[in-house]
Amino acid sequence: MKRKHESAGKQVSRTDRRKELTEHIQKLLEERGLETLKRVQEAIFEDEIESKDICEALKHFLSYRHGFLVRPMLISLGCEAVGGKTDLVPDVATPLVLMSAGMDIHDDIIDNQEKQESRRTVYGRFGQNVALLAGDALLFKGLTKWHHLAEKLQPQAFVQLTQMLNEAFFEVGDGEALELAFAGRLDVKPERYLAMVGKKAADIDLLLRVGAFLGHGTREQVESLGKIGRSLGMLWVLSDDVNDIFDREEMKRRLNGGCVPLPLLYASRNEETKTKLRNTLKNRQIDKKDARMVAEFVMKTDGLAVTKKKMKDLASNMMREIEKLPVTEKLTLLAEASLDFISQV
């Protein structure tokens, strides 16, 4: 009886901590991101847009408020982690958010992503042509705002930041191209998939590096923040992979031409089971019943367990790098939240 009570107590404790973590991170998002969100909103509509469709598409995209808060929060935390002042964060975050937003809209077109977290994407609501033009508008607006940074930063600092931006965005683009090449394939080696995920995480790496750079961190500190960002970005991608295994609609989309999630790639390493799965799914559109079958297939193999192990390794890498920094509290919260997700799976 005592063990049951102890177990129940631990469960309550974990639930309370989970709630506490969620509240802390939401507070961070609001505190560190609202000024950038305001500037992004002003920037998007500071020029007259005659097309009603584009205006409505941009307003719809702005309703994804959470996504506009994450990037300035990460830049701010990177700056704070090296003991720097965060005064310039909104100036730098605003163009980065605009450019990333444009890329996100274009990614939805490539991925045929009509919904995200039960809400319609710009592509899903307005179609390919409007989404493409809305994404273009955000990209060009972001590039223009980035150019204005030259007036606020020392010339050498602006050149260095621009080089960091160039390298990161090209790496992300390379990762997206690799993802396209992996679409619908069960024969992708998990190691190659993880390398692709690492490239896609370059934007989170960039945000924390930029923060450390603005905070005048040492070269070693900038490198540590980059590694933290890379691990965090990979964790977020793999978290989506795990969630998608149990989301029949999303699993259906991914099996019908998207990129097969990592747990399924691990589960498909056995040739006999891979052949059976391929024969079941080939030459027809996947429905929700098939998606459920795939989830059961993953659960019966080691696909989920091995993915969780990789995620735990990434979280451990984060913690090792965080311990090297002067200010660790907020970044530790992010690492803890990532570990908490893994424990729930």
Image (cartoon, rainbow, N blue to C red):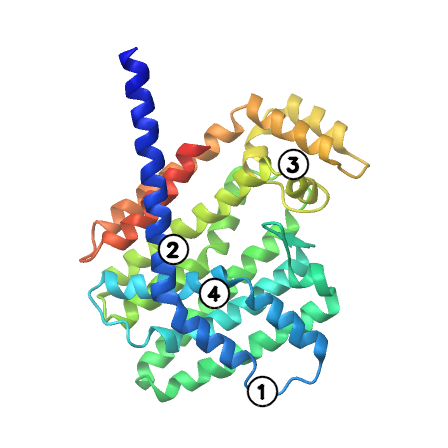
Whether residue 229 sits left or right of residue 126 in the image: it is left
Residue positioned most to the right: 283
Q: CA distance from mark 1 to mark 3?
A: 47 Å
Q: Nearer the viewer, residue 273 or 304?
A: 304
Q: Amino acid at mark 3?
A: Leu
User: In the rendering, which numbered label is found on residue 47?
Assistant: 1
Q: Earlier in the sequence, mark 2 or mark 3?
A: 2
Q: In this figure, which residue is indicated by the disc labeled 4?
A: 68
Q: Could you tell me how far apart the alpha carbons at marks 4 and 2 are, in whole angstroms?
A: 13 Å
Q: Amino acid at mark 2?
A: Gln
Disc 1 versus disc 2: distance between alpha carbons? 32 Å
Q: What amino acid is found at the position of numbered circle 4 in the picture?
A: Phe
Labels 1 and 2: the sequence-earlier one: 2
Which residue does the numbered mark 2 point to in the structure image?
26
For the point 34% across and 73% down, which residue is it?
89
Dot 3 falls on a residue whose secondary structure is: loop
| Circle 2 crowding by C-alpha within 10 Å: few under 14, some 14–19, many from 20 | some
Q: Which mark is residue 186?
A: 3
Whether residue 277 is situated above or below residue 198 in the rendered picture: above
First of labels 4, 2 by sequence position:
2
Q: Are marks 4 and 3 in contact (CB under 8 Å)?
A: no
Q: CA distance from mark 4 to mark 1?
A: 20 Å
Judged by depth in the image, the label closer to the viewer, 2 or 3, is: 2
Instruction: Name the quarter where the N terminus is drawn.
Output: top left
Image quadrant in which you'd find residue 292? top right
> Which quadrant holds residue 44?
bottom right
**CA separation in Å, label 4 and label 3:** 34 Å
Residue at 36% x, 53% y is 25
Q: Position of residue 340 (x, y in %)?
A: 37, 38
